[in-house]
Structures are given as C-alpha cells and as structure tokens.
Amino acid sequence: MTSLTLMARIRTRRPVIHCITNLVTIGRVADTIAAVGGRPVMATAPDEAAHVVDGAQALLLNMGTPSEERWSAALLAGRKAIERDIPIILDPVGSATSPWRMAHCRALVLGVKPSLIRGNVAEIAALAVLEPVAGTRAAGVSVDASGGRASAQSVATLAERAAAALGCVVMVTGSENAVSDGHTTVSLGPGHPVLEPLVGAGDVLDGLIACCLGAGSDAMGAAEVSLEILVAAARQASSDGSAPGSLWARIMDTLGDSELCSPSVRDALAVYVLADTGLASPERQPDLVSAAIAGGATLVQLRAKGLSTLDQVHLARAIGVRCRDGRVPFLVNDRVDVALAVGADGAHVGHLGQEDLSPEDARRLLGPRAILGVSVGSDAEAIEAERQGANYVSAGPMFATSTKGNAGQPAGVALLRAVRAATTLPLVVIGGITPERAGALIEAGADGVCVGSAVLRAENPAGAAAAVRDAVSASLASLRSRSSNSAGSE
C-alpha cells in the first residue's frame, strides 16, 4: 500500500488511537494523530485504560515517562487490545537506562505481545538481549539517540535479530532506519537531518505508525509508510529554513495536507538529470552527477545501455552513493534487476509493449514503495501506465535530440498537453531541453524537465544544472502566484 493510499484510508476511516504515551510530548503526539485524520485518546488511568480500548482501533504504548501507575495502565490496556485483536505499538523508551525500566518493558513484551516495537539501537539491543551495533552505546532516555552512527547494514541486522528474538515486527530508528519481521528486512535509509535534534520526533513517528495500523495496514507497511510520511513532512516544512520552534508547527501543518505524499515524486522531477554513458564515459559519471546535484538536480537516472550487467552494477552503486549524499532520488533505466541489486529508489522503463519490462511487472518486482517511471508517446499510453502502477510518466522527445538514437521525431508541446490532460500523474518531459526552453515547458503543464547533454556535456555541469533549476523554479513560482491570485479573486 502506498503512502498516499494509506493516508487517504486514515482520513476515511478516522481510527481511534488510545495512547498511553510520553508526558513530555503528549500534546505533540495527539496533534500528529489528529493532523493525519486519526482520533487520539490520551487516557492513562488504570481504572479506565481497558475500557477506552473498547472503542479504539490501535493502542500506542510509549514508556518515556514511566510510573507504576502507567505500567499498570499499559498492561491492562494491552491485555484488552489482545482480547479485541487490535494492533499494539510499543516504544521502550530508555529501556537500557535502568533495571527497573527494563524489567517493566520486558514484562510488557511478554504480557501484551506487541504488533510492532520501535526504538533506537541501544533500546532495541537491550530489550532483545543482543549485542549493540558496533559504535553505539546507551544514550540516556532520548528516543532518537542512537549513541553513534551505525551503518545501514548493521541497523538492518539488528532489526532482523531483534524481531526473531522478540517475536514481532521491530523497527530500529536513528541515523539509519530499518524494519524487520525476522524473515523480511527492509533498510529504510536515513531520516531527515532536521528531525535529529528535535525532541519527540520518535514519539510523533509512533503516532503515525499507530494511525497506519489502526487504518488496517500490516506492521511492516505501517513502519515504512510512517517514516516516509514524516520525512516528507520534514522536508516540505523545512524548505524555508524554519527554526526549531516554528518547524514543529510547520510539520503539523504539512501533515494535515492531503496531498503530502503525492507531490514528493512531483517535486523530484523538477530538474531530472539523465546520467547517460552515451554522453560521458562511465568513469566521469559519478563526478558529473555530484556536480549536477550541487547545481540543483532533484533526481538522477542512470542509463548505461552499452555496459555489462556487472559494470552497470558497479557504476550504479557509485552514482547511488553520490545521490544519497546529495539526498536526491536515484533511478536505473530499464534494468530493474540492477536497481534492486544496488538499492536504488526505483527504475524507469520504456514505452509499453516494446523491449522493456511492462510497468506492471516492474512494479511487482520493485514493490509498492519504489519510484517507477514510464516513457509514453500518447495520452492512451499515459492512462495505461497509470493503471499499471507508474508513479510518473515521461513524454517526449519535445525537440530534436542526439541523446537517444531511437527517440523518434519531435512531438513537441502538443504531446505534453495531451498527456497532461489524460492523467494527474507527475509528468516530466525529455528531448532537446535547454535552460532557455525549460520555462515554457513548465508553463505548458510539465512538472519537470529531463536534461542530459545540456548538463553532462557542459563546460560547467553545476552551472548548467543551476540554469535549468532557475528556469524551472521561476516558472513554477509564476504558476503558483497566478493560481493564488485566481483563488483569491473567486
């Protein structure tokens, strides 16, 4: 289930989430649940804890500010949740801090059998009686402290081992994030840097997970989608450089946006750079990609038609590192196997019915969270691409191009407008695009432009990417301004 679908389901079903949570962040958690469409109930008294669960669709137990009364309430509520067969998320905050806290956390694990346990490296390692990941240590009671920066592989391994030991889905969060049910393990990558110093980011994530569980998601999917939602909100909310105090308010506003997860791919298409080995040698590609990202590239796709599978994997890994460092999505052209092998964000496949995998087959292999783009040459192809699971479509060539030998005759703005009218999917255009042409294409309905030779063959690739970025940004700002003025006059 995609993040957009699950967000819509939360808003439709409006699950009641019974929270016995951290007193430091109780208001923030309640606001988060309400913002995405859930209904929070913050009842902590043992005398009513079980009764409140009767009307809930999920139970959240965050033991950040524990007391004997709250432990009792959590256990009573948890037993009622088991009886009603509703999902339970447990956050064992600071479980490694004291024997008293650890004993109660383990009693909850045994007594209420959580659907999902979320914690940082130190908390999860201690709770599961496992060796911590190298380079980390217990770090007080902060839900976000990992005590060090562990590798993605180490965090994934910890999640898998802990899930097997604890008998439920385990999500490990911090500088790297992963989730596992003991059999299937998914590395979720880093979060967003603005979240790291914010007190309560983990508690807010707990609230999102509870909403997803309450709306009917499985625990693995709830963990994946909730992190995606929180990162998307942080990215959007921090785009104007808000200070920490106002940033939380912006994040709450953003979480309430029904289109929150829809624009993420749309925004990434703005300055789409095609790292084509037909335009520059494989050896130069990683540095060219870094330069393009420095200039403002928002997404990179590797096209390496002439390379062997092994060489494609090596090059894709190198470019993937540059994209990850630059925090832009990375896709692989055609080769879904290569995309999966290197952990790319997704893939792009060619026109329907030609030599590439169908979008439907590519989606089946990539899974629901990957970005999948499809080249289209007509409005009918765009409609079919959407039906088969595409996240975006690419239309072109707009103008004559030497980048792709079999690109066909230029289709121009007529194709752009036809595709835009046929689908609401994000749309990027390709073929012969320069900074001078980019703005008009955005004005005509494109969400972004794909450039190859204009950047890769430029004397100053970073400067060329910046010129495209500026042209696209100016046109998008102009469109937003006109839309705002039009709305205000109605």
Image (cartoon, rainbow, N blue to C red):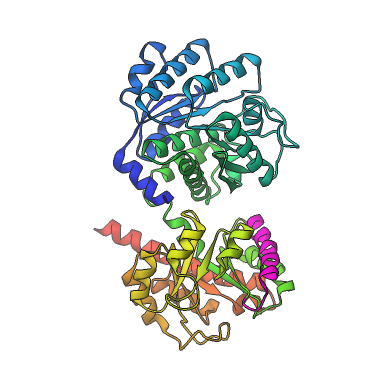
- The residue lying at 48 percent from left, 11 percent from top is 69
Residue 104 seen in the figure: yes
Q: Position of residue 310 (x, y in %)?
A: 69, 68
- The residue lying at 40 percent from left, 35 percent from top is 33
Q: Is residue 323 magenta?
A: yes
Q: In terms of image quadrants, where is residue 423? A: bottom left
- The residue lying at 52 percent from left, 21 percent from top is 110
Question: In this rendering, would 9 be left or right of 299?
Answer: left
* Whether residue 152 is situated above or below residue 131 in the rendered picture: below
* Whether residue 234 is situated above or below residue 143 in the rendered picture: below
Q: Nearer the viewer, residue 92 or 447?
A: 92
Q: Main secondary structure of the magenta part?
A: helix
Quadrant location, the C terminus: bottom left
Q: Position of residue 457 (x, y in %)?
A: 66, 79
Q: Nearer the viewer, residue 4 or 239?
A: 4
Q: Position of residue 80 (x, y in %)?
A: 38, 20
Q: Position of residue 93 (x, y in %)?
A: 58, 25
Q: In terms of image quadrants, where is residue 170? A: top right
- The residue lying at 56 percent from left, 83 percent from top is 404
Magenta segment boundaries in residue numbering: 305-326
Q: Nearer the viewer, residue 414 or 355?
A: 355
Residue 392 seen in the figure: no
Q: Nearer the viewer, residue 358 or 222?
A: 358
Q: Is residue 268 magenta?
A: no
* Whether residue 203 is situated above or below residue 343 in the rendered picture: above
The mark tally for this picture is 0
